[in-house]
Amino acid sequence: MTRWGMVIDLDRCTGCAACEVACKSENNIPTVSPEQAEMGRAISWMKVTAHVEGEFPHTDMHFYPRPCMHCDNPPCIKVCPVEATYISDEGVVGQIYPRCIGCRYCANACPYLVKYFNWYGPEWPDPEQQYLNPDVSVRPKGVIEKCTFCHHRLQQAREDVRAEGRELREDDYQPACAEICPTGAIVFGDLDDPTHRVADLREDPRVMRLMEDLGTQPKVYYLRARE
Amino acid sequence: MTPTRREFVWTMGAAATLALQETRDVFWTTESGDEDLGWAPGLEERHNSTCLICPSRCGIRARVVDGRLVRIMGNPLHPMSRGGVCPRGLAGVQMLYHPERLAGPLIRVGPRGGGQWQPVSHDGAIALIVERLQDLRAAGRPEAVALVAGYCAGTMRDLWRQFLQAYGSPNYVPDEYDDGTDAITALMHGIPRRPGYDLERADLVLSVGAPLFESWWAPLQAFVAYASPDGSDVGRSRFIQVDTRFSRTASRAHDWIGIRPGTHAVLALGIAYVLLRDELFDARFLAEHVSGFHDAVDERGRMREGYRSLVMRNYRTEEVSAITGVPVERITQLARELARSRAPVVVCGPDVTLAPNGLLAGLAVHSLNVLLGSVNRPGGVLFEDDPPLAPLPVPELDETGRAGLERAPVGGAPPPFGAGDPAARFVEAIAAGTSPEVEALFLYYADPLASSRHPEAWRAALAELPFVVSFSPFLDETTRHADLVLPDLLPYERWQDAPAPTSYPHRVWGVARPLVEPHPGGMHTGDAVLAMARGLGGSIAQSLPHESFESLLKARARGLFSAGHGMTLGGEFERRHHRQMEERGWWLPVHDDFEEFWDELVERGGWTDLFYDNTDPSRTAQTPSGRIELMPAVLLRELAAEGGVRRPYVDVATQDAAAEDEFPLRLIPYRVSTLASGTLAFERWLVEQPGLFPDVLWAPWVEVSPATAEAMGFADGTMVWVTSRRGRYRARLKVFPGTAPENVCAPYRLQSPDGEVANPLRLLEPSSDPLTGLSSWFSTFIRLERA
Amino acid sequence: MREDVKAKLAGMDPDERVLLRPLVETSRRFYVIAAILGAVTLWGVFAYFLQVRYGLGRTGLNRPGYWGIYIICFVFFIGISHAGTLISAILRVSKAEWRRAITRSAELITVLVIGFGAIQPIIDLGRPDRVLNVLFHAQLSSPLLWDVISIGLYFTACTIYLYVPLIPDLAIIRDSGIKAPRLYRLLAIGYRGTPVQRWRLERAIGVLSIVVIPIAVSVHTVIGWIFAMTLRPMWHSTIFGPYFVMGAIYSGIAAILIAMVILRRAFGLEDYFKDIHFDYLGRLLLVFSVLWFYFTFAEYLTAFYGGEPGEMRTFWAKLTGPFAIPFWTMVAGCFVIPLTLMARPSTRTPRGTLIAGIAVVIGMWLERYNIVVPTSVNPRWEVESIGHYLPSWIELSIMSATFSGFILLYMIATKFVPIVSIWEIKEGREAVKEVAERVARYSSSAQY
Ligand SMILES: Nc1nc2c(c(=O)[nH]1)N[C@H]1C(S)=C(S)[C@@H](COP(=O)(O)OP(=O)(O)OC[C@H]3O[C@@H](n4cnc5c(=O)[nH]c(N)nc54)[C@H](O)[C@@H]3O)O[C@H]1N2
Ligand SMILES: Nc1nc2c(c(=O)[nH]1)N[C@H]1C(S)=C(S)[C@@H](COP(=O)(O)OP(=O)(O)OC[C@H]3O[C@@H](n4cnc5c(=O)[nH]c(N)nc54)[C@H](O)[C@@H]3O)O[C@H]1N2
Ligand code: SF4
Ligand code: SF4
Ligand code: SF4
Ligand code: SF4
Ligand code: SF4
Ligand SMILES: [Mo]
């Protein structure tokens, strides 16, 4: 079985936020005004968050790039009254924008808070629409959205591979954030395929997941050396 | 929230319309619910190019769909950036398609800065400029033309210089970043170029105040080294960061040494002390390549202390510890670690050099590389040549031109070492009226009204200047005061070359090419300069015989084609293969003719030569003695001329004012790397979430330690006034445990939502290093009050 | 008032005369108040249209403060709805004689307020146009869907439960001929008070009052479960079902008390809403204030004792952090004030219960606030900082409109149905003997 997952090496991440902007650019994420950003309405499917421990001069800071965890046991999908969020056979948790009624229940049910709401309709003042990615639909106002593991890239890759008459390889399908990370901190692939790097990295002794105790079984793993 | 007028009118007048509308909305929303954008996926192309947003010049790969630039990604063929891009580069699409981009050339009507413009054609604009320039030449005053050039890479700079020279003006005024490290290498090595750092092959990188992962010359270079080139943990360089602030670089380095502001060089010499005391330095390298180490007798027969004695006498570890705040064991440990490493390198950053004793401090820090023998060897400091481009023709000069060039440039002589801050000297001279009049000013990539630390001088100067032309694609603050705007194309629409950043130790000639159809209202400033030359005719036209900027670039690339080394950008394997071949002295031409070479070069995004010949002694020192001079004679003379108060390796710390009751905290301004220049304000994704803290977004903030916040009774998020002797601004308090209790860290170049620019730089006390003329950013004390 | 109506009223027995008078006599003050309430309601409708048009961005909601005023009001109003049905059903089932005067006004509250509660989550939707998706694409595992079902059921049951005991009174109005004869003829469905009809009516009421209890309990349980089924700190709690039911009844009693005081003043019902009613309901309030404390204490102690970091962050945010003011006001409103007032007979007066009732209503609104907002804005992940939520004028307008709309409808209802059940009052007068016998049956037979 294919189970797409991600391993993020925190000991390699410099907090540059390239993944964040790459995701915004790839997935047609609108910008909001300063006031809206202040209110906490900026959308960022991938968000790099600083985790600071200890006080000067013994401070330690790590950056957690945080996409949707694509939980194997996702608390977000059970609560949706209209089944507008679902988990695919390959473990990718997706959204059906045209069905979502915008109740934000799933957003509250996600312990990682990675669901974002379109408080207003997205705006791309002319000529900003020019840079929109035609492979990704633009979400209307009033619906929830979140990281999709760049699912459109998988569809694209599948088509390409079929045309070439071969199997899907690890590098055929890489999400925008993993692709751009300058330090290679984000590794993406099939957790169940031993030839993929993620399968290997998952065995790293530094491995951990966020809020593992909740039993959500995230498919995003973090590597972090313990001091 | 109060109802806007629009809402009010709308309620009164159109309740019925609304009802209809809403019903339609409610019942006619399509199942898909997606916004119809009116385009269908179509022809998709990918092209390699070069990012021109900052001096790093990384390789990018553009995804173009139906002629629209949809994504910027990394070019994996680029040897420095290796497929990585930073957020600034990624958000370039937002700059290209920014709504505020100018629709075409504008000519001012009404008063200066009055905001009234009339469109004009490109030819019309050029004709106007040419007319002005002809008049000035006819009056015998070609020197009355000046250019303030901000970020001006590669051939654009050569073109402007050539133009001004042929025209006869000495007033090329660079307004760009200078960290003063070229002055250090010029003095010690006799090589007037900034040191290249071979971070990738170094096993220990000691960064002394260099923001490697943030606003350094090339953050991508640092990232690649940090990640290790092959992505494995084997051979990863170890990074140690000496920094006042617990910066992003400091936090992600393997080790951070928090240090008192202005004492970086003292720590460096404290390390040198241990190296010397324990005989841990590279004695062979010193014997073969270095002078000034031992005491010596000078030409007048006096005994002069050498480096060794000075350090041994002045930097005993306990004293260094007391000054820097770094524990004794840490200093010893650092020295041992450096000595133990196979290929250590010490990077000298702007925190060291942009200080009142910046040059002397920089020499002290760089001296560690010399002691460790980390010069001109893999993993050390390297000095590579420029790419072998074909030169521009030697400018033809007529009588007028020659006479103009002989006149003194506006702003007078530069400081003894380095260029200092030419733009500041320029504008002060104009504002003070101490220079011959400037009649025409060109602004290229510069917005001094917004960015200069002397905005009043600029305001005054702009009011005086009779003719100001801006080439900015946006109506930035200074452009609003121009008489004529001839908007440049944006980087993704134009040809441009971009040599690798100065910190990268190898030759790379990146090429940016038009990725999308250029905006009809824009004109490549390079083409505009060529058109101006054609319009002026005569010797000027002869000096710039190129039809377009593209053909100029192509002509220059002929030099690469016939160089007999190097390659167009290529993958990991190709790169390694090439390097190994060249190391053995082999190089095979792979292209039949130049056209084929050029096409491939453009397709791959540039040219590189990764072979570095470190057997060449001229890459270690080009001083008269042929040795690295720890005690450069010119410097000693200059210091003597100053009055002999300052001595190398002695006066290296910032002698700063102390905190006082009224202003108890030290202001540490720093740059948020995603907002490092005014241009980036056009990238909305960056402006939206500029910092590390998700709860402080657009509003300016200042960071204080928890202890300081508690002592003042301020909670996280309190709005405060930051007040220094020179001014104040409002910011939000952010409690950050990484901040030293006596400091307040303040990010700059942030605009608050109400449009007021919170600029901590305007709070700074002015001071500069007389040797380099570089202003120092430090030594300002402030207080915080509830706003 | 028309002369003939006046004459007819004069000809009635005293109960009917007093209780039917409001149906035909309306004061100026009534109109003024109704106009004000109507204006507030319309303003709220306008605010809602703005919200639909521009998006939920017009609220103060954000990430992570995803839920706010609307969800608070949803829980609050559905809670209030427990006033009627549950209380009147329980009192009926337990044959509490003193219930007779108060059931009607309570049941009316229920039916009217459910609607106002039930539209809150719809107002809260980002895509109200797609609300029917909950039927077309229903996913039964969602507690929100359980709510759709149980509220639907509850509303139906309550409406019937209001209507059935109303029939004899409707017949009385029909027979009196004082108002809209055709309407009342229709509504009274031929009820004549024959023994068979009477027997059937009482049967139906008996069954309904039993059926309605579990439905009412389920409604607020499920509302509690909306929160409890998530993994969010201080929501994920087993106690939430019963806690919500208890709170609902508590706020319901408070709402009845307030309504009764006002009705008594407005319609001169001193003979029906007697001090003893306030005394009894006051005792109930007292019991519930203690229960409320018990539940709240249990809930917070469990969170505190476990000391789980995620929980603790929310816990302290409520007790000493940014939510301390609403939290301690809630404690005062739900516990301190009602306890001190209702514990002493001397303050279990109409005035005392009014104060206590208002305190409880405010307190219970704040309780919902303290449940919804602090958890919503508090990320479980300590790396993320706490959010903030301030309702916008749109939300406040819509909330005011909900209150005013409800009060307005309630006022209008008093113009159509007697606010005290006439037939039950009469039956009560006749039942004195039967009650005495009943009481004698279950009192000890020991001789004094
Ligand atoms: N508040 C504040 N002030 C500062 C700084 C700061 O960070 N904050 N930094 C200081 C420093 S270190 C420096 S170097 C200076 C930098 O200051 P400047 O040299 O003035 O550079 P920018 O602010 O980046 O402004 C460059 C201008 O070039 C124009 N431009 C953008 N793209 C193009 C293009 O493709 N072609 C052309 N022809 N023009 C273009 C834009 O209109 C932009 O306003 O500012 C200094 N002052
Ligand atoms: N990628 C990228 N790189 C860039 C640029 C870019 O746009 N993009 N811009 C370039 C330009 S124009 C510039 S000017 C440079 C700016 O690069 P830097 O000169 O590095 O600028 P800042 O980040 O402002 O660094 C100021 C540092 O000084 C420290 N500091 C503040 N006060 C004191 C003090 O009293 N003593 C000491 N010792 N330190 C103090 C602060 O903590 C901060 O770390 O970046 C250049 N590099
Ligand atoms: S791009 Fe990579 S290094 Fe940069 S923040 Fe994201 S994960 Fe970290
Ligand atoms: S992280 Fe949140 S949104 Fe993503 S699958 Fe898990 S619960 Fe759902
Ligand atoms: S917001 Fe949309 S996806 Fe989330 S629970 Fe509600 S309907 Fe489902
Ligand atoms: S996987 Fe794709 S959608 Fe998810 S964070 Fe990365 S770039 Fe964004
Ligand atoms: S570092 Fe500079 S050149 Fe490189 S991608 Fe970022 S902005 Fe572009
Ligand atoms: Mo700069």
Image (cartoon, helix red, strand yellow):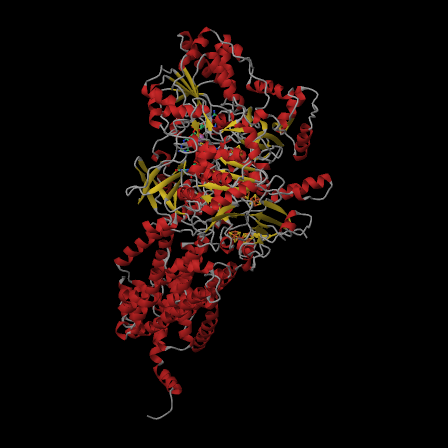
Position of A178 relative to C98 (above/below)? above
Which residue is drawn at the image coordinates 26% and 63% (left, top)? C3
The residue most toward the right is: A165
Position in image of residue C280 (x %, y %): 33, 74
Of the pair C190 and B288, the residue shown nearer to us: B288
Q: Is residue A27 visible?
A: no
- The quadrant in which residue B73 appears is top right
* Ligand 2 located in image quadrant: top left
In the image, is C319 to the left or to the right of C239?
A: left
In the image, is C75 to the left or to the right of A11?
A: left
Figure disc tally: 0
Which residue is drawn at the image coordinates 46% and 28% (left, top)? B178
Position of A167 relative to C440 (above/below)? above
- The quadrant in which residue B751 appears is top left
Of the pair B719 and A185, the residue shown nearer to us: A185
Q: Is residue A6 visible?
A: yes
Position in image of residue B489 (x %, y %): 51, 24
- The quadrant in which residue B140 appears is top left
Position in image of residue B141 (x %, y %): 40, 10
Position in image of residue C84 (x %, y %): 39, 67
